[in-house]
Amino acid sequence: MNHSSHLYIDLSKEIHKYIQNKLSKGEFLLSERKLAVKYDVSRTTVRLALQRLDKLGVIMNVPAKGWLVTGFDEGSFNLKGMVSFSENMLALGKVPSDRIIESEHSVQDSQIMKKFETNQESFIKFVRLRLADETPLLLETTYLPESIFGGFEAARLQTESMYDLFRDEYSQVISHSVEEISAEIINKEEAELLDLPKETAILLVEQKTYNNQNKIIEYTISKFRSDKFKYKTMYSNV
């Protein structure tokens, strides 16, 4: 294993390969202790790797039993936890990419101010078309408060993670997010970008992201192609 500061990410990829090659939906993964021995890492690293796979929807924890393989498959997009589009696509064996459609600064919008629960703020706004294997899958419109993210350039997101930039350059520690899911009929321009017939129904997800001071630092509207995604979740009564 590569002994880097992101060892748990490398480990999660190794465990994911093991699951794909050796296990089936409904089977249980090796215990944390056995995984630590198998990959010659600490149990803390194993736990972080398993939590990452849990957020990706690959496994879920069943109390007193262990980590269960969920059967996360092609076409499923996990909405559980702070997991990026890129991570979801990589978990499915696809190559993610972005196309910046629009980017502007100093946006004044009273409706967006309400989303951020403020009456005085200007925003950075950018629209991204998210693709996997060059196929357009979703359209995202994101707003960031300029008082926190002054100078933020959306073009960097074609090669860098937005949440990594939040943490490393703006000292923003993410606490949690709140999502609302609904359906919507897209307009002609959106249909063309997503390569869909006009007036197609799509899955609409509105997300507010909070920092560790419980302040909203991001508002994103995501429009998912309904012919490429399905919402999948799993519950356990154990």
Image: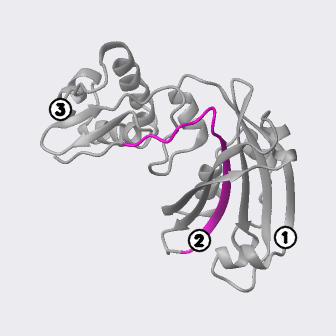
Judged left or right of residue 133, residue 216 is left
Q: Amino acid at mark 1?
A: Val
Q: Establish if 66 lies above or below 180.
A: above
Residue lying at 56% horizontally and 63% vertically, measured from the top left: 209
Q: Residues within 10 Å of mark 3 (few under 14, many from 20)?
A: few
Q: Residue 111 lies in what quarter of the image?
A: bottom right
Residue at image mark 2: 216
Q: Position of residue 165 (x, y in %)?
A: 65, 53
Q: Are marks 1 and 3 in contact (CB under 8 Å)?
A: no
Q: Which is nearer the N-term, disc 1 or disc 3?
A: 3
Whether residue 62 appears in magenta in the rendering, the answer is: no
Q: Which is nearer the N-term, disc 3 or disc 2?
A: 3
Residue at image mark 1: 107
Q: Residues within 10 Å of mark 1 (few under 14, many from 20)?
A: some
Judged left or right of residue 203, residue 39 is left
Please name which of the two marks, 3 or 2, marks the residue nearer to the observer.
Answer: 2
Determine if residue 51 is in view: yes
Residue lying at 65% horizontally and 63% vertically, measured from the top left: 219
Quadrant for the N terminus, please. Answer: top left
What segment carries the magenta color? 215-233
Determine if residue 1 is in view: no
Q: Position of residue 144 (x, y in %)?
A: 71, 65
Front-most of residues 197 and 34: 197
Q: Position of residue 130 (x, y in %)?
A: 71, 39
Q: Amino acid at mark 2?
A: Ile
Mark pair 1, 2: CA separation: 17 Å
Mark pair 3, 2: CA separation: 38 Å
Q: Establish if 221 lies above or below 52.
A: below
Front-most of residues 94 and 37: 94
Q: Residues within 10 Å of mark 2 (few under 14, many from 20)?
A: many
Q: Residue furthest top?
A: 21
